[in-house]
């Protein structure tokens, strides 16, 4: 069992911690592409207003009547946003691949990023199709 002296020493040492106090500055340090992030991430290469416009257009088109429908539309917007990010990443990857072909004898091998992007695109497409199916399934006849 830990003695009272040790507990008090641990408390004093904890006050000297050098960890970040304001995590708003460090919370995205490990973020690579935002494709699997729990919350939507608008990267520095994207425009938040573009995402908001996409969401507003979907809300106008589908006119959700319930909270669940509203959530599904938000998920659809997020899925589409991530899909657009994948398309942009593929374009950059294709351009990078063309450059690599000029410099490397291993140009015929597919890149790891391409495999990951393809898998994420398939997953996003399936999730979007499920959302649309649920939306139409729950509509009154």
Image: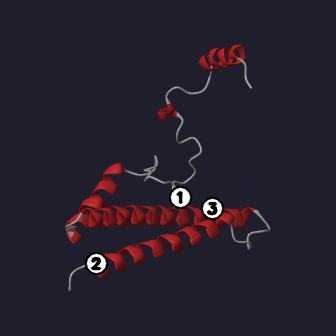
Residue extending farthest front: 1
- x%, y% of residue 130? 41, 76
- Estimate how packed mark 1 is, as few (under 14), some (14 to 19) or many (20 or more) residues with alpha carbons within 10 Å: few
- Of the numbered discs in the image, which one, if any, rests on residue 36? 1
- Estimate how packed mark 3 is, as few (under 14), some (14 to 19) or many (20 or more) residues with alpha carbons within 10 Å: few
Q: Are marks 1 and 3 in contact (CB under 8 Å)?
A: no
Identify which residue is drawn at 56% across, 27% down. Answer: 20
Closest to the observer, 83 or 23: 23
Tell me the SS state at disc 1: loop
Measure how far apart labels 1 and 2 are at the Cα level. Answer: 27 Å
Q: Are marks 2 and 3 in contact (CB under 8 Å)?
A: no
- Estimate how packed mark 2 is, as few (under 14), some (14 to 19) or many (20 or more) residues with alpha carbons within 10 Å: few
Count of labels in the image: 3
- Of the numbered discs in the image, which one, if any, rests on residue 96? 3
Of the two numbered discs 2 and 3 in the rendering, the one whose residue sits closer to the viewer = 2
What residue is shown with label 2?
A: 138
Measure how far apart labels 1 and 3 are at the Cα level. Answer: 23 Å
**Sequence-earlier tag: 1 or 2:** 1
Closest to the observer, 36 or 33: 36
Of the two numbered discs 1 and 3 in the rendering, the one whose residue sits closer to the viewer = 1
Tell me the SS state at disc 2: loop
Q: Quadrant of the C terminus?
A: bottom left
Q: Quadrant of the N terminus?
A: top right
- x%, y% of residue 93? 59, 63
* Quarter of the figure with residue 59: bottom left
Residue extending farthest bottom: 141
């Amino acid at each position: 069992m830990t003695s009272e002296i040790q507990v008090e020493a641990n408390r004093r040492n904890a006050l000297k911690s050098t960890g970040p106090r304001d995590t708003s500055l460090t919370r995205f340090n490990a973020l690579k592409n935002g494709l699997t992030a729990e919350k939507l991430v608008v990267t520095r290469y994207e425009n938040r207003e573009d995402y908001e416009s996409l969401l507003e257009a979907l809300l106008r088109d589908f006119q959700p009547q319930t909270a669940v429908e509203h959530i599904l539309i938000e998920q659809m917007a997020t899925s589409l946003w991530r899909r657009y990010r994948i398309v942009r990443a593929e374009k950059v990857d294709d351009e990078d691949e063309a450059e690599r072909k000029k410099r490397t004898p291993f140009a015929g091998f597919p890149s790891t990023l391409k495999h990951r992007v393809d898998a994420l695109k398939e997953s996003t497409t399936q999730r979007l199709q499920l959302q649309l199916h649920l939306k139409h399934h729950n509509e009154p006849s």
